[in-house]
């Protein structure tokens, strides 16, 4: 067994679950991130293309002096539309990859007591691809319904905002726990989403508060990851304006803005993966609280050894 292995199948308190998440990151951040980058190569490429198209379209609108090979507003609109389409693909592909990869990673970690075999993760994802796609599509419909309800709640001062946040954390928890059910216990879509709803609503306040705390912590990580390119971008804009450079028509400015926007998107995508990683840890805790399987197994082993 890996000496740095952290047992996730425990009946932990709320604070202990948070602590377990950070211990898990401490010991597995490097290996997890290396595999994450390998599995998200397509997303990274799409993000760079999307950033280029959106930034180019924005800068084209900002200036009517088209020096990037665009001679009219139609071309500018085309850049925006193409960028928006690719951004949608990024959201779909990364949701598919991040939820699947993070869930499979945690399941592999637990099953092999800390030893990660990348081929097993890939095989696990491929074997469940049908279930994953179905859940992503249905999850998309649930998210649309959430947006409709959120739009209605905006007319309710203060209380509406609180309900919105509650719904957001609830849906995120259902998604995260359902994906873990698919990979941890090899369940089909019906059984997995049923368990996701069960774990969420039977431990509602723990799950919602956990999502709130992890969400804040992941936002801090996102801020840290995007701080360096943001500072560089701020310095560049400051000196460009101070020296009279027309940012809207500068090729170099377009390159800098593209890289900055790409870094921001990639940091956001990575924070999404970390969020699912946290729900993987929560899943094993809730599963053990309900079924008590791992503790019972340990007790049985003590009896055999005696």
Image (cartoon, rainbow, N blue to C red):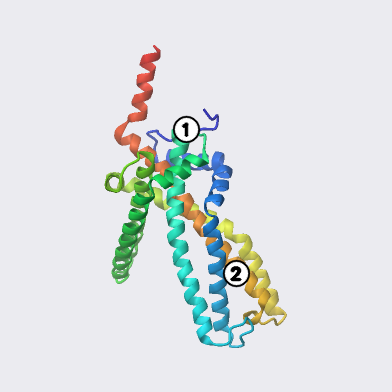
Residue sitting at x 30%, y 45%: 188
Q: Earlier in the sequence, mark 2 or mark 1?
A: 1
Left or right of residue 37, residue 188 in this image: left
Residue 122: percent from the left, percent from the top?
47, 45
Residue sitting at x 35%, y 51%: 130
Residue 98: percent from the left, percent from the top?
46, 52
Quick one: quadrant of the C terminus? top left
Residue sitting at x 57%, y 76%: 56
- Disc 1 marks which residue? 112
Left or right of residue 124, residue 200 in this image: left
Q: Nearer the viewer, residue 32 or 72?
A: 72
Q: CA separation, marks 2 and 1?
A: 41 Å
Q: Is residue 181 above or below residue 142?
A: above
- Disc 2 secondary structure class: helix
Left or right of residue 231, residue 72 in this image: left
Q: Nearer the viewer, residue 231 or 35?
A: 35
Checking the image for residue 258, the label placed there is 2
Residue 76: percent from the left, percent from the top?
53, 82
Q: Nearer the viewer, residue 281 or 122?
A: 122
- Disc 1 secondary structure class: loop
Checking the image for residue 172, the label placed there is none
Residue sitting at x 38%, y 19%: 301
């Amino acid at each position: 067994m890996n000496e740095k292995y952290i047992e996730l199948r425990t009946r932990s308190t709320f604070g202990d679950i948070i602590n377990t998440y950070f211990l898990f990151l401490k010991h597995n951040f490097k290996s997890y991130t290396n595999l994450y980058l390998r599995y998200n190569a397509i997303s990274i490429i799409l993000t760079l293309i999307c950033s280029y198209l959106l930034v180019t379209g924005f800068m084209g609108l900002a200036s009517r002096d088209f020096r990037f090979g665009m001679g009219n507003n139609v071309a500018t609109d085309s850049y925006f539309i193409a960028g928006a389409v690719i951004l949608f693909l990024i959201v779909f592909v990364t949701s598919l990859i991040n939820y699947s990869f993070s869930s499979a990673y945690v399941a592999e970690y637990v099953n092999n007591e800390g030893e990660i075999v990348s081929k097993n993760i890939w095989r696990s994802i491929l074997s469940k691809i049908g279930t994953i796609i179905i859940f992503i599509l249905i999850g998309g419909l649930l998210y649309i319904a959430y947006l409709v309800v959120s739009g209605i709640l905006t007319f309710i001062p203060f209380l509406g905002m609180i309900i919105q946040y509650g719904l957001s954390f609830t849906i995120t928890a259902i998604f995260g726990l359902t994906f873990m059910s698919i990979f941890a216990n090899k369940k089909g879509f019906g059984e997995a989403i049923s368990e996701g709803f069960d774990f969420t609503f039977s431990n509602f306040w723990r799950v919602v508060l956990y999502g709130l705390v992890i969400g804040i912590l992941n936002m801090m990580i996102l801020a840290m990851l995007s701080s360096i390119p943001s500072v560089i971008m701020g310095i560049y804009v400051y000196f460009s304006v101070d020296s009279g450079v027309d940012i809207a028509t500068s090729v170099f400015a377009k390159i800098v803005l593209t890289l900055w926007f790409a870094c921001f998107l990639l940091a956001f995508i990575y924070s999404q993966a970390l969020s699912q990683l946290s729900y993987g840890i929560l899943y094993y805790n809730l599963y053990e609280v309900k079924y008590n399987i791992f503790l019972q197994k340990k007790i049985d082993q003590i009896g055999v050894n005696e």
